[in-house]
Amino acid sequence: MQALKALALTGILLLSNFGSKENGLGVGDKAADFNLKNVDGKMISLSSNKAAKGYILVFTCNTCPYANMYEQRIIDLHNKYAGQGYPVLAIQPNDTGKSPGDSFENMQARAKEKAYPFPYVIDETQQTTTTYGATNTPQVYVLNKVSDNNFRVEYIGAIDNNSRNASAASKHYVQEAVDSLIAGADVSTKSTKAIGCTIKWSN
């Protein structure tokens, strides 16, 4: 009887963990570096930009309506903070077999159409996405440089608290986090729930 109970419990645990991608980096963890292909064909890593004091790392894509609603805000974040050492670096995490609209060629077209001022790289193996623990598009990781080529995660979550209307947002989580880092202060809101489309994982 005890053996049957143990087996049943194991089955429940396995089912509850099946397909889970929620384990990943947390606030305070060292950011994992990567080497991913940008829409211009060049390989990009955290160490590529020697002038960066940190990054606004955004998991986003072409096809998610929420990502589309936040697109201009992501561009605005880069334009506001890149010159202060905190540029945007966008990662497309979806499996392109399940989401053809997020193919590398479609990424190139989108970046050209919208004149992205930041790198837009593809995570073809989804290893970087898995390592970070991203689950949604868009989802932001604000990184701060702590030493040469070493970055720490300072914030994880949503860009602000109104996905549909930028002007109606009353909390600007990413802006507040980056402003705090520039001022040498602690980030007060360290994590929020990322609202958006679930990432399309390969089988």
Image (spheres, rainbow, N blue to C red):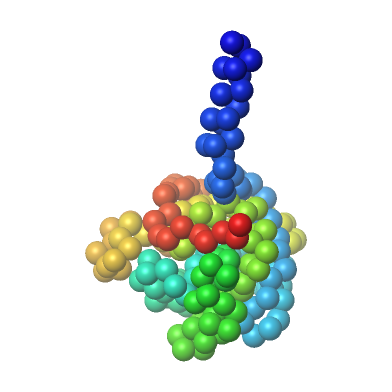
Residue most toward the left?
168
- The residue at 42%/61% (across/down) is 197
- The residue at 60%/60% (across/down) is 202
- The residue at 44%/73% (across/down) is 63
Residue 80 x %, y %: 46, 74
Front residue of 158 and 122: 122
Residue 143 x %, y %: 59, 58
Residue 19 showing in the rendered view: yes
Residue 118 x %, y %: 55, 78
Whether 53 is drawn above or below 18: the answer is below
Whether 38 is drawn above or below 178: the answer is below
Front residue of 151 and 179: 151
Q: Is residue 172 left or right of residue 120?
A: left
Whether 129 is drawn above or below 71: the answer is above
- The residue at 58%/30% (across/down) is 11
Q: Is residue 189 left or right of residue 22?
A: left
Residue 136 x %, y %: 47, 58
Image quadrant where one finds the C terminus: bottom right
